[in-house]
Image (tube, rainbow, N blue to C red):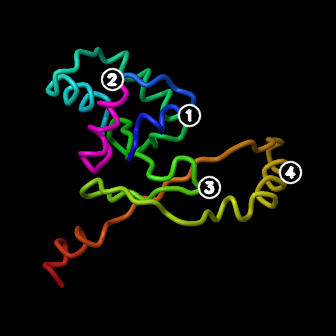
Amino acid sequence: MDFAQLLRNAGLKVTNTRLALLNLVEQGGRHMAADAITTGLHAAGISVDRVTVYRNIDRMQQEGILIPICMPGKALSVGLCKKPNGPHHHHIFCSSCGRMEEADGCVVNDNWEAIGRHQMETNGFELTDHRLQYIGICPSCRMKRNGGD
């Protein structure tokens, strides 16, 4: 993936820190917490503090480049969106190994008007956006759990 172009397309300045951060998350193939990203950047010789890492993560989340992952009992982590400028979609995460995949379709988006009417009628909120995250067990972890069956 051409991260420099991805950053430019999002209107973000291309910096060595941002490029290294995106490469690190991509190479890991899993979601990563900010502290792990900071440690990984230091190991790669990038001198950066946690505040800068958090700020960059936040900005890239806003642009859809990184996806926030909320797992019960764990620190917020992020994964790399493979289709940041693609059609509306969500992601599914393996609660065992941390694998992340794109999930096609969105039942919320498909029913947005009805959901919006319901929320307006029941609590007076006008919906403006939503976040949806699927959590499950990937095929590899299921096979390991079931003894290879």
- The answer to if 30 sits in the magenta stretch is yes
Which disc number belongs to residue 121?
4
Looking at the image, how many numbered discs can be counted on the residues?
4
Residue type at numbered disc 1 = Ala
Residue identified by numbered label 2: 17
Dots 2, 3 in contact, CB < 8 A: no
Q: Residue at x 52, y 26 (%)?
A: 12
Mark earlier in primary sequence (2, 3):
2
Residue identified by numbered label 3: 88
Helix, strand or loop at disc 2?
helix
Is residue 40 depicted above or below 104 in this figure? above
Question: Residue 26: image x %, image y %?
Answer: 30, 45
Q: Which residues are magenta?
A: 16-31
Callout 1: few (<14), some (14-19), or many (20+) C-alpha neighbours within 10 Å? some
- The answer to if 105 sits in the magenta stretch is no
Residue type at numbered disc 3 = His
